[in-house]
Image (tube, rainbow, N blue to C red):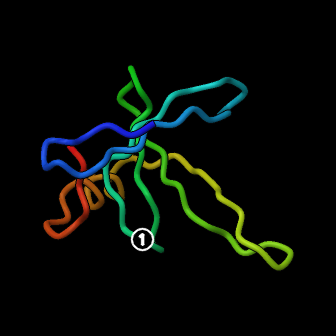
Amino acid sequence: MQEMGDNQKPVETRIIQWDGREIQIQEVVHRGWEGILYRIQNEDRYLLAFLEWRNGGYLERFRPLHGTELDQWLNEPDAGRNN
């Protein structure tokens, strides 16, 4: 599902399996091959989606992002923000 962000770019909202449960995530920052930062809906937690090469193809992976690394993603001036 896509919505429009404040800067009128499409914002991706997805449902994924994470940590043994189904969660809804919304795109915050998209940096192409570096990854996509998602915020977990109704929580103040973030996941970074990235591609990993496995067995001749790419696999989408997620990992939690917090602290200094999260601050860098949120505060990068030229990042593709969707808020």
In the picture, residue 52 is in which quadrant?
bottom right
Residue 65, position in %: x, y? 44, 49
Q: Relative to residue 77, is residue 71 drawn left or right?
A: right
**Residue drawn at x 53%, y 55% as measured from the top left:** 49
Q: What is the three-letter code of the residue carrying label 1?
A: Gly
Residue 60, position in %: x, y? 65, 58
Q: Relative to residue 12, is residue 50 drawn left or right?
A: right
Residue 39, position in %: x, y? 39, 38
Circle 1 Cα neighbour tier, 10 Å, few/some/many (<14 / 14–19 / ≥20): few
In the picture, residue 17 is in which quadrant?
top right
Q: Relative to residue 82, is residue 35 drawn left or right?
A: right
Vertical relation: 35 (above or below) 45: below
Q: Residue furthest right?
A: 55
Number of numbered discs visible in the structure rendering: 1
Q: Residue furthest bottom?
A: 56
Q: Secondary structure at mark 1?
A: helix
Compare residues 60 and 47 and report the one nearer the observer.
60
**Residue drawn at x 59%, y 51% as measured from the top left:** 62
Compare residues 19 and 14 and report the one nearer the observer.
14
The residue identified by callout 1 is 32
Q: Quadrant of the C terminus?
A: top left
**Residue drawn at x 71%, y 63% as measured from the top left:** 59
